Image (cartoon, grey):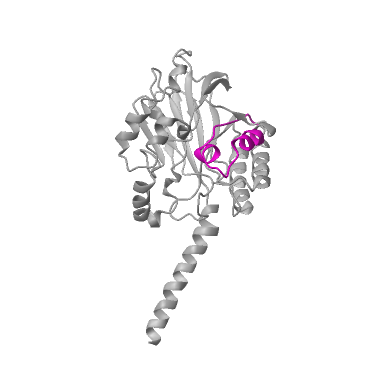
Amino acid sequence: MEGMLLGWMGVISILVLLGVYSWQIEPRLLKIRRLAIQDKRFLRSARFVFISDIHVTWFTSKSILAANLRKLRREYAHQPFDFFFLGGDFFDRTDHNEKLLQWFYGEIVSFGVPVYAVLGNHDTRFRGVSNAKVKRMLRENKINLLENESVILNAAGTKIQLIGLRELETSHEYLECRYFIQSPNFYRRTIKNVFWYKRFDKNKPKLYRIVLSHNPDSVYLPGRRRPDLMLSGHTHGGQIILLTWIGLIISQINPHGSFRSWSGEKRLRETILAISSGFGEGLMPFRFGCPPDAYVITLKPWAGERCCSSQL
């Protein structure tokens, strides 16, 4: 009896330690994903950072966000960024913690570089989040919101085209397949009926093209000119890898799209797709085996080597 009690105490102790680690430690272990891209169109090197999925809610820890922002500041001090890109999902299901998100925006803007953003499904679809409030807060902080719009940026002397796409779940076609068990190919076929990206077919084809889209399924949107680089989030990289088998079951009931819980880089023909595992935590304030991340991307002149390399 005593041995069984000690055994249960040991199990409970391990679970408590795992809980504390996944709640207070791993969410602070920001991973810097470095991606270097070479292209003949770049005159000089330019550098920017991309983060996604902040998911501010009533239980979000300011100290955790601050710790990860400090790591980004050290990265900036080593070599400054030219731009800051945000991939959406600023709130998580409710917009009650506006004060914390205002503080976060202020920290991002204090880097002193132009900031561009797109919205995510939590910013547009959940009843607890006011889409008007999200847009107002971005506007008040002088963060440029792109909704099926493009801008021309000067990246260290080279003009690049930045396109920001609306959240896919605001399209009737994509939302229809959001709540049912579907194969990845089904999502890809459905995307072919959403024509947001085709409006950019007539834009200058010679410029390097970066697309910001919260949902990585946007990479399958129809259009003649494919993105050179697409930056997305949404998947959280699984967030709690220990529960991957549970996640696989949940993703079949409430799927997140064709990429499920995948994150990282992938080449899809002409496009380099980079999916962030997120800067914050969604639904539950835990991470295990999947720390938060930030992409630091360097665009370099062509040197006759591989077009891109990553250092994870």
- Name the quadrant of the N terminus: bottom left
Q: Position of residue 279 (x, y in %)?
A: 53, 45
Quadrant containing the C terminus is top left
Residue 311 in sight: yes
| Displayed quadrant of residue 106 | top right
Q: Would you say residue 308 is visible in this rendering?
A: no
| 204, above or below 190, in the image | above
Q: Position of residue 258 (x, y in %)?
A: 35, 38
Q: Nearer the viewer, residue 312 or 199?
A: 199
Q: Quick check: 12 above or below 159?
A: below
- As drawn, the residue found furthest toward the bottom would be 1
Q: Quadrant of residue 105?
A: top right
**In the image, residue 284 above or below residue 259:** below
Q: Which residues are magenta?
A: 113-138
Numbered label tally: 0
Q: Nearer the viewer, residue 253 or 217?
A: 253
The question of residue 116 being in magenta is answered with yes
Q: Position of residue 62 (x, y in %)?
A: 63, 51
Q: Is residue 257 magenta?
A: no
Q: Position of residue 31 (x, y in %)?
A: 50, 46
Q: Residue at x 49, y 67 (%)?
A: 17
Q: Is residue 290 left or right of residue 28?
A: left
Q: Please tell me which residue lies in front, 176 or 158.
A: 176
Query: Along the horizontal axis of the image, is 159 left or right of 257?
Result: right
